[in-house]
Image (cartoon, helix red, strand yellow):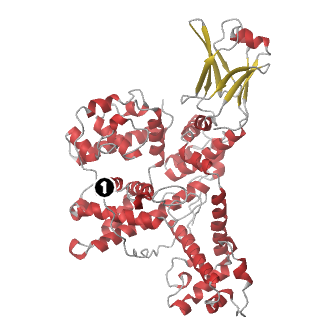
Amino acid sequence: MRLPGTRYQEPGWEQVRKLLGQCSLDVFSRCDVDALLAQGDALGVYVERLAESLHAASRSARAQAAGNSYGDSVVELALLLVYELAARPGDFDAFRTALPPAHARGEALLRKKVNDMFALLRDKVDADNYQAACGRPCSPNRIYAYRMLDTAYGELARLFAGWREHHAQVGAILGRGLDGALPIEVRQLTSIAGCRPEWILRWSETLERFTGSPGPLHTRSKRFDSLKGNAGKIGEMLLEIGEYEALSANRDRDWLQDLDTSAAWIEDYWRVLDESHAAATPGPDLILEALQDERDVLDVPAPAAAAGEDDPVAMLRAESVSLPPGFVLAAGAAQDPASWSARMLAGDTLAVRLAVYARLLGLDDDSYPDAWRDPATGQLPTMAQLAALDAVSLPTLRKRRDAAIARLQDATSKGRIT
Amino acid sequence: MKTSSDIDRKLRERLLLAPRVEGDRLMLGDAVLLAALDGSRALTAGERAALQGSPLTTRRLRTLAIERRVAANDAWQGSHGMLRAADSGAALTRLATDDGFWRLHFVDSGGARRVILQLMPEAPFAARLLRGGTLLRVLDGAGAEVLAGRLDLDGECECAWPFADDPAAHFQQRGAVFCVQPQPGPQP
């Protein structure tokens, strides 16, 4: 399923989820989980190690596979989600709280809790992506509802395609008896946009009769309360999925690329702030009311447990080698001292500066000069290597890095930078 | 290789877009954001604070700003400029288009005159022209080609001055106007 802005709603998500589970277990297998989670900056440590593990696994077939139809690979989507987690401590706290004590958990349970965390996070992230892309309010639960409807349509289309063997169920969905001739509805159904909401309602209503388990709109869960019996709302959502699917299939890829890579909008952002500072429109403020999304009833069942994990992918672990002699000098010389970030970070050590870049742009970005890269990995040095450079502990380096980022953040959001 | 402005640009974008606020939502409607973008209604102080406190609303502003820029770029068919009265007399060193998005610089290096076309970074179509490698032409008032080429990464394109007389005299004799145009036809 594709919706405006969403990245994590296509079948490739399964591989993203598995890669995150695999690399999380890799991280946990090499440390004392409870000790890690008890640290003050447990989230920071976890994110850092998970990102390193993902980078190490990034050449595996699973990591390189397409994660969606926009051209994002599985490992790219996984890394993005990890950085989203870094910015959402609440989600990580929920994971920590949900984890039973060490003696009561095995690898499978650990993996399931990681799965749950990222499964909830992907819908939060995509709800935000959707809102940024089209300007309409959207909650994670609404994304979940779109997906339920998309899955229901897939199931219904499968039944229609095999209408002879499923004639009783198809008849129940259509609300009439079938006489043995190809039903016209079956012939006409070619896309989710043409799926009638009554069919979805009747499919859900009769599912228990045919399969033994109740349909998603007929459980006692409050999750889909606002859709229950509401053909109008279901129809709107089906149509939206179908229309965007058609639109995005024909869309000019270059244009999408432009949207993603142009940073010129920051000039516009600063101009908007400057003009408001210079001559603010007198009140009243036109601030949107918070819409209580009626779908946002929190009765969130844990996502379906992971199916059997397939064979483990060999991990290409970059050994943590020491940096070449002369690294500090060469790397320091490779930075243009007149650049904005260099001036803003002038009071910080090289290690702190590189840690800032790594945190914000990732270990590997095509804008990095070669002299910043560890020849052994082709990427920026890891946090452990950087801490060693400054002869400080990891927590100290993190603290300094985060302070530097806060300074940059403050300067950027205030307005134009000269 | 020195670090480029590329890093700073990416860094600033990330600094604006990366933060997440628990319970964040769209604080400003598209109408308010678009009016602020096109300058017809500046944000109130309260709206400004709401924008700065909401990374999600900032991301929505980004989408609208980029769409606006793409539309403006698609609409760009060329820019025109003229020689001002004040430009005559002293040696001509600089001309600007009426929309302010382009400058022509004239430099004299050891007897060899050169002309430099410069794109102002605030031009709404700047990012696209830079990335797209669009072939550009500068024409004088008689339609003769002053310069043709693609912009470099700094948004500049430089050639030898192709005429015998100096720039001021040349433009004066040809209606005192000039234009910058995208070259029609297939682009790379």
Q: Is residue B111 above or below residue A48?
A: above
Tell me if A219 is positioned left or right of A330 in this view.
right
Tell me the SS state at disc 1. loop
- Which of the image's four quarters has the N terminus of chain A? bottom right
> How far across and down, in percent of the image, does residue A85 sit?
39, 58
Instruction: Specify whether A188 is left or right of B117.
Output: right
Q: Is residue A7 left or right of residue B170?
A: left
Residue A283, visible in the rendered structure: no
Question: Residue A399 at what x, y percent from top left?
Answer: 28, 45
Instruction: Mark yes or no: residue B173 visible.
Output: yes
Q: Is residue A268 left or right of residue B12?
A: right
B102 or A271: nearer the viewer: B102
Residue at image coords 37%, 30%: A335
Amino acid type at mark 1: Leu
Q: Number of marks in the image?
A: 1
Pointer 1 local density, CA inside 10 Å: few below 14, some 14–19, many at least 20 = some
* Letter of the chain that mark 1 sits on in the rendering: A
Q: Residue at x 49, y 49 (%)?
A: B53
On screen, A4 above or below A380? below
What residue did someone put label 1 on? Answer: A316
Residue nearer the viewer, A279 or B2: B2
Place of residue A262 in the rendered image (x, y in percent of width and height, measured from the top left): 55, 42
Residue A90 is drawn in which quadrant? bottom left
Relative to A75, is B166 above or below?
Answer: above
Q: Please, is residue A180 above or below residue A98 in the view?
A: below
Q: Residue at x 69, y 76 (%)?
A: A189
Q: Position of residue B78 (x, y in %)?
A: 72, 31
